[in-house]
């Protein structure tokens, strides 16, 4: 999805630009959790989903983006949240 793709572009851009210090070049990496919802989102649930995905990215090896899985509401419509991220 577009949210994941944008996060991946940001991650790659950061990884491709090491910080220059007097001691030399220092590589920089970033891990991100990406969450989005097609339905009107509960912002707290969306932030929790992104946070869960962020910690999954860190556990999976860092310097990566993990997607939050969109949960379904009891009526079958998409909800804003995820408890179970998938790998990138």
Image: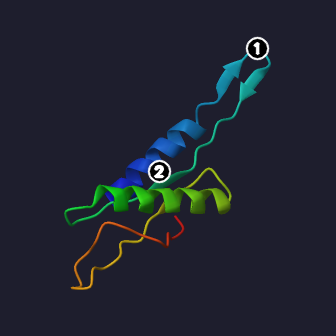
Q: Residue furthest bottom?
A: 75
Q: Which mark is residue 76?
A: none
Closest to the observer, 29 or 75: 75
| Kind of element beneath mark 1 | loop
Q: Is residue 36 left or right of residue 26?
A: left
What residue is pinned by disc 1?
22
**Of the pair 11 and 82, the residue shown nearer to us:** 82
Residue under the point 47% across and 71% down: 83
When the figure is inspected, residue 53 is found, relative to residue 7, above or below; the finding is below
- Horizontally, residue 53 falls left or right of residue 44, namely right
Q: Residue at x 27, y 80 (%)?
A: 73
Q: Quadrant of residue 1?
A: bottom left
Secondary element under disc 2, as helix, strand or loop, is helix
Tell me: 48 left or right of 32: left
- Residue farthest toward the right in the current orientation of the protein: 23
| Rendering coords of residue 26 (x, y %) | 72, 29
Between residue 7 and residue 50, name the one nearer to us. 50
Task: Tell me if mark 1 has few (under 14), some (14-19) or many (20+) residues whose alpha carbon lies within 10 angstroms of its own.
Answer: few
Say whether disc 1 or disc 2 marks the residue closer to the N-terminus: 2
* Label placed on residue 8: 2
């Amino acid at each position: 999805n577009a949210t994941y793709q944008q996060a991946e572009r940001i991650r790659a851009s950061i990884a491709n630009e090491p910080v220059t210090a007097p001691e030399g070049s220092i590589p920089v990496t970033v891990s991100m959790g990406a969450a989005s919802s097609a339905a009107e989102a509960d912002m707290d649930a969306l932030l929790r989903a992104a946070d869960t995905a962020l910690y999954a990215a860190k556990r999976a090896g860092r310097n990566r983006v993990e997607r939050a899985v969109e949960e379904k509401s009891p009526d079958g419509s998409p909800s804003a949240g995820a408890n179970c991220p998938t790998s990138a």
